[in-house]
Image (cartoon, rainbow, N blue to C red):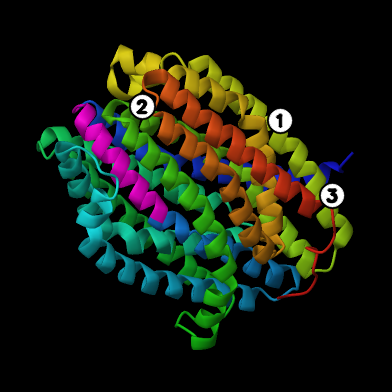
Amino acid sequence: MAPPTLNRSILGLALPALGALIVEPLFLIVDSALVGHLGITQLAGLGIAAAVLQTIVGLMVFLAYATTPAVARWVGAGNPTRAVSVGIDGMWLALGLGIVLAVLGSIATPVLVAAFTPAPEVATEAATYLAISMLGLPAMLLVFAATGLLRGMHDTVTPLWIAGAGFAINGALNWLLIYGFGLGIAGSAIGTVVAQWLMVVGYLVVVARLAVRHSASIGPRRDGVRGSARAGGWLFLRTLSLRIAFLLTVAVASGLGTVELAGYQVVFVIFSTAAFALDALAIAAQALVGSGLGAGRIDEVRRVLGRTLVWGAGFGAVVGILIAVCSGVIGLLFTGDSALSALVQPALIVLAIAQPIAGLVFVLDGVLIGAGDARYLAISGVINLAALLPLLVVIAVLSPSGSVALLALALAFFGGYLGARLLTLSLRARGSAWMVTGAS
């Protein structure tokens, strides 16, 4: 049995991270709920825009996932000044990437929306939301990098406070702009972008104080920024395979019809919320494994692996029960449409059953990220994607409709894809090749 101090360390990092992670998808839930009451067309449009945004931003999640273990290793090695400097380098990289992606994304918005072949009225709503949201891309990436820095320093409380404040501002602004000023889906996008930039301001204040405390430079260091980019390269490829899987599943849903796409948007939002919640343990694992390997404590790293797996499976079961219990009313909360609510319920039940598997997958992923084993994660990601593709092809060819279509998509993604990830990650974690010690 793991010592109580280890449990406290894990939960001390995971619980605040859980709060912050749950808040992140709540941005999308608020948007979906407010926009959903404008109509099915608007909700379907948001589904496409959200898929594009989550793909772009998701591909850049390495800014957090590469920064956390890099900072944690220097903390474990007893050099907090270098730890903060590495994190700030990641933030400069995030700003540069965010500006480039915002410009390119604005230009490509019509093409990105058209790739889903939506109905004309759905395309209009999607393009409106997406074009405005591109202005928030630099802010989203800066939040990623700053969050990674603080997690590496074993601080998951500050991101919780900033995320909570951002959520409150987002909800209030969206309601005011959508209904108070009658801006429709555009109001939702504007409110979210403003909230994102206000969160950046909060992080800049916190990071500046850290830099002063540890005598770290706040300016960009060319070698440091390049190092952050190199470290994140394999994680970028790993995340690319994940995003392709998400994107192709949404594309298949879009091809099945507007109602099916709207229904899948509801299911995917719940999956995203559950995934962020389960990922809290992965974040704790990243920080503890990174600092443990930085200090050369292999036995401690093994204990972290075993204990977080137990927590992951148990927490996944709890989340699954909650989804199953609420599956009959989740659709009503988004649209008020009883027919759509009944349509999504079977898919939500499949999602609920898969949650313990998801808990194990996210923990294993976090452990290997914390160890810097990004090359294996990238290669296994391609293998996992190969397992999903045939399932999606069969669904697209058979072209089912209604609840059968959503059930098929849920079985393919939450069963086939998550199952493949569990297998490839478990095989790696059983060995010791990933446990490389040292500060970098």
Compared across the picture, whether 259 is left or right of 148 comes to left
Left or right: residue 11 compared with residue 412: right
Q: Earlier in the sequence, mark 2 or mark 1?
A: 2
- Residue position for label 1: 314
Mark 1: amino acid: Gly
Q: From the viewer's perspective, is the residue at label 2 or at label 3 nearer?
A: 2
**Mark 3 highlights which residue?**
303
Mark 1 is surrounded, within 10 Å at the Cα level, by few (under 14), some (14 to 19) or many (20 or more) other residues, namely some
Name the chief secondary structure element in magenta.
helix
Residue 362 versus residue 291 in the image, above or below = above
In the picture, the quarter occupied by the C terminus is bottom right
Mark 2 surroundings within 10 Å by alpha-carbon count, few (fewer than 14), some (14 through 19), many (20 or more): many
Residue placed under numbered mark 2 in the picture: 263
Residue drawn at the location 27% of the way across and 62% of the way down: 105
Residue at the location (78% across, 50% down)? 427
Distance in Å between CA atoms under marks 3 and 1: 17 Å
Q: Nearer the viewer, residue 366 or 214?
A: 366
- Range of the magenta residues? 38-55
- Tell me the element at label 3: helix
- Does the segment drawn in magenta span residue 39? yes
Q: Is residue 2 left or right of residue 351?
A: right
